[in-house]
Image: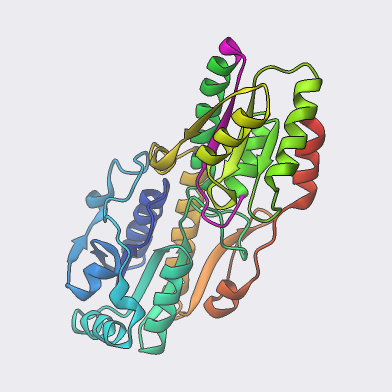
Amino acid sequence: MKKIAVLTSGGDAPGMNAAIRAVVRTAIDAGMEVVGVENGYDGVLNKEFIPMGLRSVSDIIQRGGTILRSARCKAMMTDEGRDLAAKNLKEEGIEGLIVIGGDGSFRGAEELCKRGILCIGVPGTIDNDLAYTDYTIGFDTACNTVLDSINRIRDTMGSHNRVSVVEVMGRHCGDIALYTGIGGGAEVIMIPEIPMTLDELLAHMKDYENSGKRSGIIVLAEGAGSAGEIEKFLNANTNLEVRASVLGHIQRGGSPTNFDRYLGTTLGAKAVELLKSGVGNRIVGIKDGQIFDMDIIEGVSVPRTINKKLYEIAKVVAK
């Protein structure tokens, strides 16, 4: 393989730049030419190809976001868009493509594989919603960002005898809420995988009041409800003073943690190793501390499960 490309697709995640850096430098070391694709799959369709050298990825490992920028490309959901993407890559002489992104990005890569482009997927999403891998690039940083916010919010809640409903990202995956709820000592954790009704929440908060607590934190995954609605409900049905805090896109940004830099680097290097061997239609990940690869179709089909034992521990230590 003589020429490969790399792109970032979907939501940005801290550590993507570490992966880009590893791809570029590992590929050049292996004697390959590397092209960066700007703006995700949109860039493939619009031929936004830029040559990448050793110095083009200098001083980026500590930066959040992605230097190649990203986008969600609706055209890649159509056969016409996929055909054009494959055509543009072939005209550019690109034999292999490394896609750093989430589930939707991988499905685009799968379609390009069917059209003769060897593709490798690298998991980059703060949601940690790809079940085939223990962790995705960006998850650890997002958790630490949320934890810092919870610490700050808890300070002011304690000063005013208030409860804060902290809404975090994750779409339909509750991992950010679960892990930061444990780390932040949350009194209640609400996640979509284990639904909690408002009546059940009310019972929790009644016990909370009776225990003598006057301030606290409820961590809410965005797929499990609305912080604003829960704020109104609890204010109307308890003697607690409740405030909602929606953290939003602050969770996506910031300098990646050491773990996300390590993960981005090792997964990026593994992706190049596979292409160098002429292998495509694979995704890379980490399982039990080991970097591995598997078939892309099998990987995106692995059903998601929540760590119920962790959730039960969180309930016990919150009392």
Q: Picture quarter containing residue 180?
A: top right
Give coordinates of residue 206: x percent, y percent. 76, 29
Vertical position of residue 127 compared to residue 283: above or below: above
In the figure, is residue 141 to the left or right of 158? Answer: left
Q: Is residue 3 visible?
A: no
Give coordinates of residue 14: x percent, y percent. 41, 45
The residue located at (27%, 82%) in the rendering is 81
Give coordinates of residue 127: x percent, y percent. 52, 52
In the figure, is residue 182 to the left or right of 122? Answer: right
- Total marks placed: 0
Q: Which residues are magenta?
A: 158-174
The residue located at (47%, 73%) in the rendering is 274
Membership of 161 in magenta stretch:
yes
Vertical position of residue 43 compared to residue 246: above or below: below
Vertical position of residue 119 compared to residue 230: above or below: below
The residue closer to the viewer here, 28 or 42, is: 42
In the figure, is residue 307 to the left or right of 17? Answer: right
Membership of 204 in magenta stretch:
no
The residue located at (52%, 51%) in the rendering is 170
The residue closer to the viewer here, 74 or 25, is: 74
The residue located at (62%, 14%) in the rendering is 161
